[in-house]
C-alpha cells in the first residue's frame, strides 16, 4: 500500500465526516454486514419504486397521448437511462473519492440519489406541462443513475476480502440480499396504496408517497454507511486491503479484459432479474385482466422465496465453490428460458409457477454474482475495477432488459423472451470458462 494512494482520503472534509459520523471510533465486526445490507436495500428500494411506477403510473401520467403498450415502452426507455448514467457516475465520483475521500463521495452521491428520487414525487404530468414532463423525468432518471454509480463504497469488496476462505460464498451473498428486501418494501407500498385508493386518487397523489419514503430511507442508509467508511478503523482496513481509488480511465484501459469478463459473468442472473420483477408486471398489466395488486402480492412472495434461495446459495457455494454455483445456475436458467415465459399466459397458476420458479433461480444465481472475477484485479485496481464491473454488468445485462423483453414479447411472442434470457446464460458460461482458462495460465506462468 503506497502513501500516494491512501493520502487523498485524508482531506479536511474527510476528517470532518469522521468526527460527525464516528463518535466513539469503535465498530463491532458485524456492523460491516449490516451496513452493506442497509445500503444495498436502500439502493434497490429506489430502483424498484421507479420500476413499478414505470409500469403502473408513468404510461398514464407522462404518456397519455399514446396507447398503453407504447406508453410503457417509452417508460422503459427512460428507465434504461439510469443504467447509462451509472458509468458516468463512476468516473465523476471516483475523482471525488481521490480528492476528498470516501465519506464525502458517499454523502454527495446518496443525497443526489435521494434528491432525484424525491423530486420524482413532485413531477407534474403531461396534462399540466406537456412534453416537458418526459424531459424532466428523463433528467431525474439520469440523476439517479449517476448517483448510483457514485454510491459504490467498497464495503462489499471489504466484506468479501475479510471473510474466512471457507465462508466466502456466504459473505459474497450478503450484499445481494438488498435486492429482494428492497422489492418487498417497494411492492408492499404500491400494493397498499392501490388497494386503499381509487384509481383516480392513486394516479393523482397516491403513487408519490413511495418516492418520499425512498428519500427517508436514503438518509438512514447514508448515516449507517458513513459510520463505517468514515472511521479510522475501517479506513485502515480499506488501506490494508489496498481498496483505494485508482484513476478510472487508467483502470479501464489497463484492466479492460477483466472488466469485460466481470460484466459478462453475471449476465444470466442480471437478465433474469428484470424478467421476474419488472417485465412480468408490465405483461400482466397490459395483456390480462388481472388486478395489479394481486400480482404485486405474488412478487412479494417471490422475493421472500428469493431471500431463502440466496441464503442457500451462500451455503452451497462454501461447499462446492462460487464458480460451480454460477455455472450450474446459468445452465438451469437456460433450461428455464425454454418454457417458462409462456407460463405468463397460463392464468394465475402459470404466473405463480413462473414467478416462484424464477425467483428461486434468481436467488441462487444472483446470490453469487457479486464480484465473481474481482479477485483477478491487481490490488491497486481492485476498488475502482470492482465499481466499473458492477455498473457495466448492470448496463449490459439489465438496463435494457424490460424494454427488449416487452418489445419482443408484444411483437413476436413470449417465446422470444426465453431466447433473450438464454443468450444471457450462454454469456455467463462463456465468461466463466474464459476466466478459468486465464486463471490456469496465470498459475503456470
Image: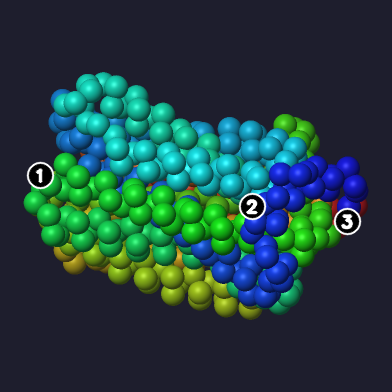
Q: Position of residue 84 (x, y in %)?
A: 50, 33
Could you tell me which residue is drawn at 21 percent across and 61 percent down?
A: 192
Give x and y (percent) for residue 332: 45, 63
Label 2 SS: loop
Instruction: Work out whether mark 3 precedes mark 1 in sequence or the reverse, and give the earlier one.
Output: 1
Task: Please state which of the two labelled residues, at mark 2 or mark 3, is closer to the viewer.
Answer: 2
- Alpha carbon of mark 2 to alpha carbon of mark 3: how far? 34 Å
Residue 370 vs residue 139: left or right?
A: right
Q: Whole-Å distance between the Cαs marked 3 and 1?
A: 67 Å
The residue beneath circle 3 is 444
Sequence order check: which comes first, mark 2 or mark 3?
Answer: 2
Q: Secondary structure at mark 1?
A: helix
Sequence-earlier tag: 1 or 2: 2
Say what secondary structure mark 3 lies in. helix
Q: Which residue is mark 1?
A: 200
Which quadrant of the figure has residue 129?
Answer: top left
Relative to 438, say whether 73 is above or below.
Answer: above
Q: Residue at x 46, y 66 (%)?
A: 363
Residue at position x 22%, y 42% in the image:
57
CA–CA distance in space, label 1 to label 2: 41 Å
Residue drawn at point x = 29 percent, y = 22 percent:
132
Find residue 153 and name its label: 2
Q: Is residue 12 left or right of residue 312?
A: right
The image position of residue 141, as x and y in percent, is 41, 35
Tag 3–tag 1 contact (CB < 8 Å): no
Quadrant for residue 309, please give it. Answer: bottom left
In this rendering, the label closer to the viewer, 3 or 1 = 1
Mark 3: few, some, or many residues within 10 Å (few <14, many ≥20)? few
Amino acid at each position: 500500500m503506497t502513501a500516494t494512494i491512501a493520502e487523498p482520503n485524508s482531506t479536511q472534509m474527510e476528517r470532518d465526516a469522521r468526527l460527525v459520523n464516528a463518535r466513539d471510533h469503535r465498530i463491532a465486526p458485524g456492523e460491516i454486514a449490516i451496513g452493506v445490507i442497509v445500503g444495498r436495500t436502500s439502493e434497490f428500494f429506489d430502483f424498484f419504486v421507479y420500476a413499478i411506477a414505470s409500469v403502473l403510473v408513468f404510461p398514464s401520467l407522462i404518456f397519455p397521448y399514446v396507447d398503453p403498450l407504447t406508453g410503457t415502452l417509452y417508460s422503459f426507455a427512460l428507465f434504461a437511462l439510469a443504467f447509462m448514467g451509472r458509468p458516468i457516475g463512476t468516473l465523476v465520483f471516483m475523482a471525488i473519492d481521490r480528492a476528498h475521500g470516501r465519506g464525502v463521495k458517499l454523502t454527495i452521491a446518496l443525497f443526489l440519489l435521494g434528491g432525484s428520487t424525491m423530486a420524482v414525487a413532485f413531477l407534474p404530468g403531461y396534462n399540466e406541462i406537456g412534453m416537458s414532463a418526459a424531459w424532466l423525468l428523463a433528467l431525474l432518471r439520469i440523476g439517479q443513475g449517476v448517483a448510483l454509480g457514485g454510491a459504490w463504497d467498497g464495503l462489499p469488496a471489504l466484506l468479501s476480502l475479510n471473510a474466512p476462505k471457507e465462508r466466502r460464498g456466504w459473505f459474497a451473498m450478503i450484499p445481494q440480499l438488498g435486492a429482494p428486501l428492497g422489492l418487498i418494501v417497494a411492492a408492499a407500498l404500491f400494493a397498499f396504496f392501490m388497494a386503499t385508493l381509487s384509481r383516480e386518487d392513486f394516479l393523482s397523489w397516491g403513487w408519490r408517497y413511495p418516492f418520499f419514503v425512498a428519500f427517508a430511507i436514503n438518509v438512514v442508509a447514508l448515516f449507517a454507511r458513513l459510520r463505517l467508511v468514515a472511521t479510522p478503523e475501517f479506513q485502515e482496513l480499506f488501506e490494508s486491503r489496498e481498496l483505494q481509488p485508482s484513476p478510472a480511465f487508467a483502470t479501464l484501459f489497463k484492466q479492460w479484459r477483466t472488466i469485460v469478463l466481470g460484466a459478462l459473468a453475471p449476465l444470466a442472473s442480471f437478465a433474469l432479474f428484470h424478467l421476474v420483477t419488472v417485465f412480468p408486471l408490465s405483461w400482466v398489466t397490459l395483456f390480462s385482466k388481472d388486478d395489479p395488486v394481486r400480482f404485486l402480492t405474488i412478487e412479494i412472495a417471490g422475493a421472500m422465496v428469493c431471500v431463502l434461495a440466496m441464503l442457500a446459495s451462500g451455503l452451497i457455494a462454501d461447499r462446492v465453490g462460487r464458480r460451480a454455483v454460477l455455472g450450474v445456475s446459468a445452465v438451469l436458467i437456460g433450461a428455464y428460458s425454454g418454457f417458462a415465459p409462456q407460463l405468463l399466459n397460463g392464468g394465475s397458476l402459470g404466473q405463480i409457477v413462473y414467478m416462484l420458479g424464477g425467483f428461486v433461480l434468481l436467488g441462487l444465481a444472483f446470490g453469487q454474482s457479486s464480484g465473481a472475477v474481482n479477485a483477478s484485479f491487481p490490488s491497486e485496481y481492485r476498488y475502482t475495477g470492482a465499481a466499473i464491473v458492477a455498473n457495466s454488468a448492470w448496463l449490459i445485462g439489465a438496463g435494457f432488459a424490460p424494454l427488449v423483453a416487452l418489445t419482443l414479447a408484444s411483437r413476436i411472442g413470449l417465446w422470444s423472451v426465453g431466447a433473450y434470457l438464454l443468450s444471457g446464460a450462454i454469456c455467463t458460461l462463456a465468461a466463466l470458462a474464459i476466466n478459468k482458462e486465464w486463471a490456469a495460465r496465470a498459475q503456470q506462468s
